Image (tube, rainbow, N blue to C red):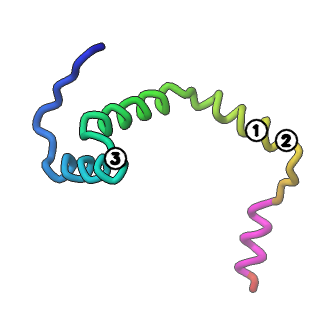
Amino acid sequence: MAQVLVRDLDPEVVATIRESARRHGRSLEAELRLILETAARHRSTDFWETAERLRTRSTNRQRTDSAALIRADRDR
């Protein structure tokens, strides 16, 4: 496994992550590892793949014209 050293972190950021680790019952290192892994997985998801997946999930849903809804709300 690779090791990473991050310097000059804001002490408030470290304190926030340390508190989050405490609440989750993890060490600071484990919390940081989880944050980095989650961020790396999230970033690797291609935007267009996500858009297509959402489009597929919503194919049978009724769509409404948002402009008409906004206009009706303004006319109240």
Q: Is residue 17 above or below residue 71?
A: above
Question: What's under tag 3, amino acid-wise?
Answer: Gly
Taking depth in this image into account, of 58 and 1 the one nearest to the observer is 1
Of labels 3 and 2, earlier in sequence is 3
Crowding near the residue tagged with mark 3, few <14, some 14–19, many ≥20 C-alpha atoms within 10 Å: few
Whether pointer 2 and pointer 1 mark residues with C-beta atoms closer than 8 Å, the reply is: yes
Q: Secondary structure at mark 3?
A: loop
- x, y (%) of residue 54? 71, 39
- Kindly identify which residue carries mark 3: 25
Crowding near the residue tagged with mark 1, few <14, some 14–19, many ≥20 C-alpha atoms within 10 Å: few
Residue at left offset 40%, top offset 29%: 37
- x, y (%) of residue 26? 32, 42
Residue 59 — which label? 2
Q: Which residues are magenta?
A: 65-74
**Can you name the residue that lies furthest to the top here?**
1
Question: What's under tag 2, amino acid-wise?
Answer: Thr
Taking depth in this image into account, of 55 and 19 the one nearest to the observer is 19
The answer for how far apart the CA atoms under marks 1 and 3 are is 38 Å
Residue 55 — which label? 1
